[in-house]
Amino acid sequence: MSYGNKSLRIPALLTLLPLLALSACGPTVRSSIPKGGTLPSSIALLPSDYSGEIPRERVDLVRQALTSELRNNNFIVVEERAVSSTCSTPACPERGQLSQRYLIDGFVTLNLASFSRSNFIAGYYNELSGEIIVRDPADRELVSVEHSQNEQGGIVFQSGQLIQGIISQVKNSGDAVFENLAAKFSQTIVEQLPAPSSPVILAAQEGITIALNSASTEWISPTSYRICANGTPASFAYLIMGKNRTGLREGSPGLYCENLSSLVATDPSHPAALELRSAFGTSIKRNITLPTNPPCILENRLQASSGELKLLCTQVGSSSSANNAGCSEKIAQCAAERIMLFKAASPAGPYEKVADLSSSTSSLPLGAQQIEVVTVGLGGIPSLPVPLKITNK
């Protein structure tokens, strides 16, 4: 009997059962903490070494599961971005900076040794092996837990019909099985750790307040805008649009900004929001309105003949109406505060300003041949300059 490109007889498979049972031993714990002692409540999971055989994506899944399990057991785990932006290598020689900046008293290292996944004729067997080590700021080992987590399924390992074995194998072919294994691995390891320090210390650190004082958006070009948030320094700021999350950079203490393309699609069913998050996971969120009415994009809007310039579908200044000639679905109406004309002797320039217009229909300068047009949009944002093609009609 064969399955895919592999074949294995049932009697031969059954001889593996004693070996599989032996691999299901419990965790190995080494601890220098006295009985009844506690671990630091505030810890950082140091960067992983991705040079091993396990793919980076799967290492990250274990890291996520481990972080979640530690937090579920009352540890404060500093945000990964705070750690990765400080540590230059997986060994993190900058631990002192982390400890001072985020009040960290413990450092966790995750070492994954191996991952194996085996599909048999009517069953499967998976195993994930590794350890975590918790050290204090002086690099003294406090506790380590080594563990091999396995899971098995199919008619070889459990009662049921052949169809159940086939279903189990199909489930075992995707990455979801690794997520389940990572969760069980992390849960088992964290259960072996001493409890974190007293709830009083825990509450004091979780009580670090975080504030989002203000937020703003402004156009910086016809196709991009700048979004900024002002709040608690040394935090993490994000723009959230539906399922998308974009980080803002802290340019100065407490000021977080990022330039974004207006071409990025938004999710109308979810309002845009700014979130500020501390390294300890506390956060504050505020809905924000993204800018509309970008500066005019002049392509296909300009029309020049008989010494006259027209801006199609453009309302200029306080005029109550726009020049709607030539409007189409591709050219939506836009608003501008004024129009500027620049001229030069040749297309290479240099260009000098020759007119500042306040109407969508204006006279061209006499004798001008090389002209570029710029509109100034609401808020004072200029459009990109566009050469004017003059026809003699």
Image (cartoon, rainbow, N blue to C red):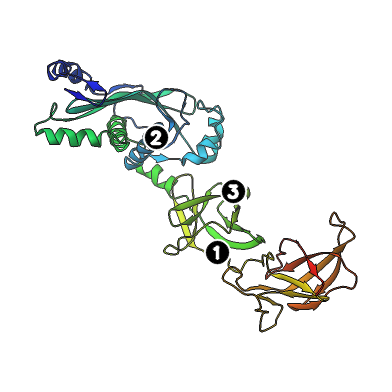
49 with respect to 263 (left or right): left
Q: CA distance from mark 3 to mark 2?
A: 24 Å
Is the residue under label 1 in contact with that under label 3 (CB below 8 Å)? Answer: no
The residue that appears at 88% across and 68% down in the rendered structure is 368
Q: Which residue is mark 1?
A: 290
- Depth check, front residue: 1 or 336: 1
- Characterize the local packing of mark 3: few (<14), some (14-19) or many (20 or more) Cα atoms within 10 angstroms: some
User: Would residue 358 be found to the left or right of residue 70 on screen?
Assistant: right
Nearest to viewer (mark 1 / mark 2): 1
Q: Which sits earlier in the primary sequence, circle 3 or circle 1?
A: 3
Q: Say if residue 357 shows up in the picture.
A: yes
For the C terminus, the image quarter is bottom right
Task: State the SS at label 1.
Answer: loop
Question: Are the residues at dot 3 and dot 2 in contact (C-beta closer than 8 Å)?
Answer: no
Q: Relative to 118, say whether 100 is above or below.
A: below
Dot 1 or dot 2, earlier in sequence: 2
Q: Amino acid at mark 2?
A: Arg
Mark yes or no: residue 34 visible: no
* Residue nearest the viewer, comparing 373 with 284: 373
SS state under label 3: strand
Measured as percent of width and height from the top left, residue 3 is found at 21, 26
Q: Position of residue 34 (x, y in %)?
A: 32, 24
Q: Nearer the viewer, residue 18 or 206?
A: 18
Read off the residue under disc 3. 249
Residue 321 placement, left or right of 172: right
